Image: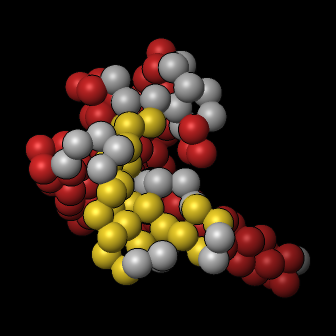
Amino acid sequence: MIYYIIAAVIIGFDQLTKWLVVTQMEIGQSIPLITNILYLTSHRNEGAAFGILQGQQWLFYIVTVVVVIFLIYLLQKNGEEGRLYKIALALVLGGAIGNFIDRVYMGAVVDFVDVYIGSYNYPIFNVADSALVVGVIMIIIFTFLDEKRQEKST
C-alpha cells in the first residue's frame, strides 16, 4: 500500500506544480530562479522525452496504459525484490500517470523546469519526468546489482 501512496504523492505534487504553471504563467514565459542556470519556463510538449514523436498522442495513451498495468502487476507480485525496487516502481508509476493526466486533459505535457549547464540548455521537464528518470535509474542499478549477486551465487 505504501508504494501506491508514494505514486499518489508524486502525482499530486506533479499536478499541483503544473496547475500553478498553467494558471500563473503564459506559454513561453520564463522566470529566472538562478540566472544562467535554472528557470521556470512554461512549455507544452506534445511528444515524448526530448520532444520526440510529436503529435503521436494515441501511441502515448496505449504505451502508458500498458506500462501502468505492468507496474501495478510488479508492485503486487511478492518476489525477492526489496523495498528500494518497489519504491523505484512507484516513482515510475507516479510519473507515468502524472504525464498521462496532462495528455488526456490538455493534449500535451506541461513542462517547466528549464536548466542550463554551461551553454547547453537541457530539455525542459517536470516533476513527473524527474520521478520517471530517478525510478528508471534505480531499476537499472537494482537489476545490475541483482545480476552481479546472482553471478556470485552460482
Task: Choose top left, top right, bottom left or bottom right for residue 78.
Answer: bottom left
x and y, in percent, of residue 101 in the image: 28, 34
Q: Is residue 1 visible?
A: no
Q: How many marks?
A: 0
Report the side of 113 relative to 55 (left or right): left
In the image, 67 versus 129, the foreground residue is 129
Report the side of 142 relative to 28 (left or right): right
Task: Choose top left, top right, bottom left or bottom right for residue 147.
Answer: bottom right
Judged from this view, the residue extending furthest toward the top is: 58
Q: Residue at x 55, y 54 (%)?
A: 123
Q: Residue at x 45, y 45 (%)?
A: 71
User: Residue 23, relative to residue 5: is it above or below?
Assistant: above
In the image, 109 versus 151, the foreground residue is 109
x and y, in percent, of residue 90 in the image: 38, 58
> If the image is split into quadrants, where does the C terminus sit?
bottom right
> If the image is split into quadrants, where does the N terminus sit?
bottom left
User: Residue 71, relative to residue 84: is it above or below?
Assistant: above
Report the side of 42 relative to 119 (left or right): left
In the image, 43 versus 90, the foreground residue is 43
User: Residue 21, relative to residue 31: is it above or below?
Assistant: above
How is colour applied across the structure in the image? secondary structure
x and y, in percent, of residue 54 in the image: 56, 26
Q: Residue at x 19, y 48 (%)?
A: 25
Q: Is residue 32 visible?
A: yes
In the image, 129 versus 136, the foreground residue is 129
Q: Residue at x 57, y 61 (%)?
A: 122
Report the side of 137 relative to 144 (left or right): left
x and y, in percent, of residue 9 in the image: 21, 61
